[in-house]
């Protein structure tokens, strides 16, 4: 009973986080400007409901029984017309369904994060390419994982076969194919997604007090990796309780995945909460600059060579190129990677700084800046508005 209460509680909290995320996005960009990730995350919530129901049925209706953890003698002695036989068959079928739902949720969340990162890295050299590679990796690994789950046991009905022994690969509760393939591909894809924002945040020229919350905000996948590994170990060592333990940890991992992946989206509310308790500096967009020049992206850089007239000509053509910059509380933002390789570069940029109003906060004034000094190091903060 305790396990069931926990599963339904985690589901409720996850759905609440998704609802908050939708509300934040609706307020900031409007329903018409919703992007693909704004639909993928609610879809993940719907699949989470189905996964929780499946986990509940395995424990509550079928006593956690499957075609696993039985000796050949026990299989031969079990009456095909008995309630235990029927429960083991039904429990085994739900295990196959539950594994598929579990994988689908995790990859929906990964795809949602990839869409989010694609907006943040618009115009940044290298990072946009990593995001495109992420789409390929996620597509291939999802198909590979699902095919491994569904095709590892042949004929398919052997997944719920009781007697004779169908073999360990047909025992979905603790099949090595299920456990190893899922945990390995899940961990590898999460690590790759972490490699997109974290190196960028580590290199930016901001003080450590602001850098740590930013990195924590985008490193939630580390908790998902830990939960996935714990689940695999638990299934492999739980013995007769493997079905119940696996279902319980699937719900836990799904919950963690949904919550941490939505934290960067709902950060305006997080910032507001920190402000109320006197910790607004952790998420403050104000503060002294480091003395460096901040171009918006590689598209805003103009390589100036030749005589002075040529520089003025190129500067006049580059000046109209503008991008919007916004602080915490805006739609999305990112801190661009410093580029120390550029030496003979002059920046001529026209920047409009704007921040959406959030819950009564004063709107940031508009300012225009122009720089013509070759900087030693580059970094930027900009908003990828839809």
Image (cartoon, grey):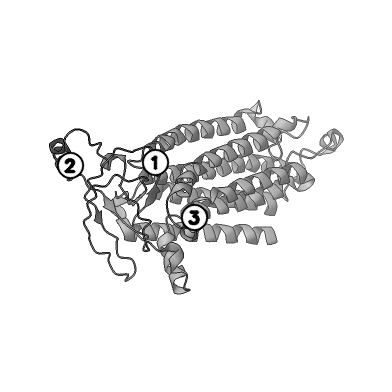
152 over 340 or under it: above or below: above
Label 2–label 1 contact, CB within 8 A = no
Give the label on residue 315, or none. Answer: 2
Is 368 in front, or is 173?
Answer: 368
Q: Label 3, on which residue? A: 217
**Regarding mark 3 in the picture, which secondary structure is present there?**
helix
Work out how far the residue at label 2 is from the one at label 1, CA to CA, in angstroms. 22 Å
Q: Residue at x 41, y 39 (%)?
A: 127
**Regarding mark 1 in the picture, which secondary structure is present there?**
loop
**Regarding mark 2 in the picture, which secondary structure is present there?**
helix
Disc on the earlier residue, 2 or 3: 3
> In the image, 3: left or right of 103?
right
Q: Is residue 1 visible?
A: no
> In the image, 106: left or right of 332?
right
The mark lying in front, picked from 2 and 3, is 2
Classify 10 Å Cα crowding around label 2: few (below 14), some (14-19), many (20 and above): some
Q: Is residue 365 visible?
A: yes
Is 303 in front, or is 253?
Answer: 303
Work out how far the residue at label 3 is from the one at label 1, CA to CA, in angstroms. 26 Å
Residue 364, image quadrant: bottom left
Image quarter (top left, top right, bottom left or bottom right) of the N terminus = bottom right
At which x and y percent is residue 313? Answer: 13, 38
Q: Label 1, on which residue? A: 340
């Amino acid at each position: 009973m305790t396990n069931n209460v926990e599963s339904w509680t985690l589901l409720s909290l996850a759905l609440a986080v998704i609802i908050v995320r939708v509300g934040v996005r609706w307020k900031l960009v409007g329903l018409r400007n919703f992007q693909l990730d704004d639909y993928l995350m609610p879809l993940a919530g719907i699949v989470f409901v189905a996964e929780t129901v499946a986990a509940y049925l395995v424990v509550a209706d079928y006593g956690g029984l499957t075609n696993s953890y039985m000796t050949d003698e026990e299989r031969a002695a079990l009456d095909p017309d008995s309630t235990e036989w029927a429960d083991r068959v039904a429990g085994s079928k739900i295990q196959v369904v539950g594994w598929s739902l579990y994988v689908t949720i995790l990859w929906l969340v990964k795809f949602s994060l990839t869409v989010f990162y694609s907006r943040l890295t618009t115009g940044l050299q290298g990072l946009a390419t990593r995001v495109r590679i992420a789409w390929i990796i996620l597509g291939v690994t999802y198909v590979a994982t699902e095919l491994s789950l569904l095709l590892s046991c042949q004929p398919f009905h052997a997944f719920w076969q009781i007697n004779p022994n169908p073999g360990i690969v047909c025992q979905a509760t603790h099949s090595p194919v299920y456990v190893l393939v899922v945990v390995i591909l899940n961990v590898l894809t999460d690590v790759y997604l972490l490699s997109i924002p974290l190196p960028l945040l580590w290199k930016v020229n901001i003080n450590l007090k602001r850098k740590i919350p930013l990195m924590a905000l985008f490193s939630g996948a580390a908790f998902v990796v830990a939960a996935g590994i714990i689940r695999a170990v638990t299934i492999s060592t739980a013995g007769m309780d493997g079905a119940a333990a696996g279902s319980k940890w699937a719900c836990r991992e799904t919950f963690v995945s949904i919550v941490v992946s939505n934290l960067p989206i709902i950060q305006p509310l997080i910032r507001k909460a920190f402000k109320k308790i006197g910790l607004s500096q952790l998420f403050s967009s104000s503060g002294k600059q480091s003395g460096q020049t901040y171009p918006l992206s590689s598209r805003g850089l103009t390589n100036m060579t030749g005589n002075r007239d040529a520089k003025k000509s190129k500067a006049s053509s580059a000046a109209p190129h503008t991008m919007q910059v916004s602080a915490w509380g805006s739609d999305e933002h990112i801190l661009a990677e410093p580029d120390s390789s550029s030496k003979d570069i002059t920046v001529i940029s026209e920047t409009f700084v704007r921040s959406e109003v959030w819950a009564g906060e004063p709107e940031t004034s508009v300012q225009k800046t122009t720089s013509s000094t070759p900087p030693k190091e580059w970094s930027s903060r900009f908003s990828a508005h839809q």
